[in-house]
Amino acid sequence: MTYHVIYDGNCNLCVTLVQLLEGLDKGQMFQYIPMQDPEALNHFGITSQDCEMGMILIDADTPGRRWQGSDAAEEIGRLLPMGSVFVDAYRTLPGVKWMGDRTYEQIRDNRYTIFGKRSSTYQSSYPVSFCSTGCVTE
């Protein structure tokens, strides 16, 4: 299975987390699109306003299957080796998911103030590639 991660390529925290995921995955499961790429977003029917609600994870095999914000972060964690053990525990402990969602929202809304903004958009070593007919290739 392949997944597309739409991330803020100008956010220092977001880019650091993408680079960490790239190092763990080596492009085997995840491919990346910076939310500053309007052509790629348009291909998936995503607007820049959609991106304001946080990172987006798209199942490449079933593009209508999507997660956003903290749900996307949880799904990425679940897909990593041994990740489901931690994510399942996180989701079942009373109040922890609610607190995680609120924390994600606060970081999302203040990411540039807290972590800074890059002077140029980060382009992943494992980008989603498009063929000449506009189709996504893996």
Image: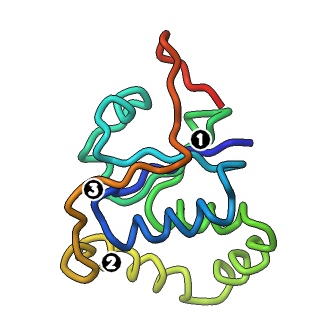
Please tell me whether residue 54 is drawn above or below residue 48 in the rendered image: below
Residue found at x 41% / y 64%: 15
Instruction: Answer few, some or many: residues within 10 Å of disc 1's Cα (few below 14, many 20 plus, some between 14 and 19).
Output: few
For numbered disc 3, what is the local secondary structure?
Answer: loop
Q: What residue type is labelled 3?
A: Glu
**Can the viewer see residue 66?**
no
The circle drawn on residue 10 is none
| Distance from the alpha carbon under mark 3 to that under mark 2 | 12 Å
Please tell me whether residue 45 is drawn above or below residue 57 in the rendered image: above
The picture places residue 121, in percent across and down from the top left corner, at 29, 53
Write down the residue under mark 3: 52
- Asked whether 114 or 74 is in front, the reply is 114
| Distance from the alpha carbon under mark 3 to that under mark 1 | 19 Å
Q: Quadrant of the C terminus?
A: top right
The picture places residue 80, in percent across and down from the top left corner, at 73, 65
Dot in front, 2 or 1: 2
The circle drawn on residue 65 is 1
Choose the circle earlier in sequence order: 3 or 2. Answer: 3
Residue found at x 72% / y 61%: 79
Residue found at x 68% / y 59%: 25
The circle drawn on residue 107 is 2
The picture places residue 71, in percent across and down from the top left corner, at 53, 63
For numbered disc 2, what is the local secondary structure?
Answer: helix
Instruction: Answer few, some or many: residues within 10 Å of disc 3's Cα (few below 14, many 20 plus, some between 14 and 19).
Output: few
